[in-house]
Image (cartoon, rainbow, N blue to C red):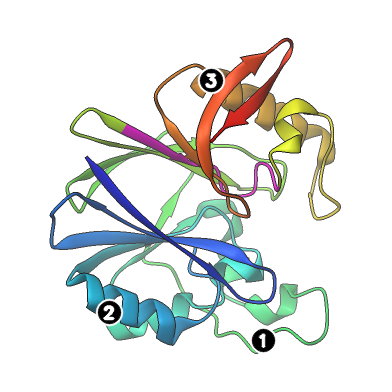
Amino acid sequence: MIDVSMFTVGMVQENCFLVRAEGSDRAVIVDPGEEAPRLLQAIEDAGVTLDAILLTHTHFDHVGAVAPLARATGAPVYCPVIEVPVLQDVMAYVPWPGFGPYESWDPEHTVAGGETLELAGLTLDVVFTPGHSPGHMSLHIRSDGEEGLLTGDVAHHPIQMAHLEWSSTADFDPVQSAVARRELFARFADTPTLVIGGHFGAGQLKRDGGAFRLVV
């Protein structure tokens, strides 16, 4: 079984996830975007040791708390290889005033998509889903027959499951983003996989004509 705790953090209201196998004393955290003290307290309250900090991509709202968490816990950071320069100089890539300051970090590990990671008693398949950002990844998590999918920002709202061609103004490549949505959702639709977005809640993907919908 998979135990997922979701924390919506920062002004952009990004979802950060503390994930562990049920009952385990080890966990991973995905996309710690802001509010490092709150996240560190959640790790302490859960009674877990952090085995890794995993990033779907390096937009500031997903990495703002990476440095303080990595420093405090000693957990290694896994970053999309294409986006390492962004994590190494976060503030240079913040597009609007009023956000930050955020610390940069040199990741201990990189991923390119296609890897299978064994961390904290979980199996995590790294799925390359570029479009929102050049190196964007989604995470397919498996444990004891249960499966979850952390999409990152492949979609920002479930309406993009019905309208695959609708892309966010924050997408690096809107056309590729639509391709990534179609391919990822087709892979996990009509399965028991619990799908959770970087800016929306959880549900299961169902095919709906030529598109998809999220059933909560």
| Among the two numbered marks 3 and 2 on one chain, the one whose residue lies closer to the N terminus | 2
Instruction: Give residue 78's quadrant in the image.
Output: bottom left
Q: Residue at the location (65% across, 42% down)?
A: 154
Judged left or right of residue 59, residue 204 is left
In the image, what residue type sits under mark 2?
Thr
Q: What element carries label 3?
A: loop
| Mark closer to the observer (3, 2) | 3
Q: Residue at the location (84% across, 36% down)?
A: 166
Q: What element carries label 2?
A: helix
Highlighted magenta segment, given as a residue range: 147-156
Q: Is 130 in front, or is 209?
A: 209
Q: Residues within 10 Å of mark 2 (few under 14, many from 20)?
A: some
In the image, what residue type sits under mark 3?
Ala
Above or below residue 193? Residue 97 is below
Disc 3 to disc 2, C-alpha distance: 36 Å
Q: Residues within 10 Å of mark 3 (few under 14, many from 20)?
A: some
Q: Mark 1 points at which residue?
A: 100
Q: Mark 2 points at which residue?
A: 73
Q: Name the residue under label 3.
A: 189
Residue 130 percent across, percent down from the top left: 65, 40
| Among the two numbered marks 3 and 1 on one chain, the one whose residue lies closer to the N terminus | 1
Q: Residue at the location (69% across, 81% down)?
A: 91
Above or below residue 163? Residue 173 is below
In the image, what residue type sits under mark 1?
Gly
Residue 105 percent across, percent down from the top left: 48, 77
Q: Is mark 1 on a helix, strand or loop?
A: loop
| Mark closer to the observer (3, 1) | 3
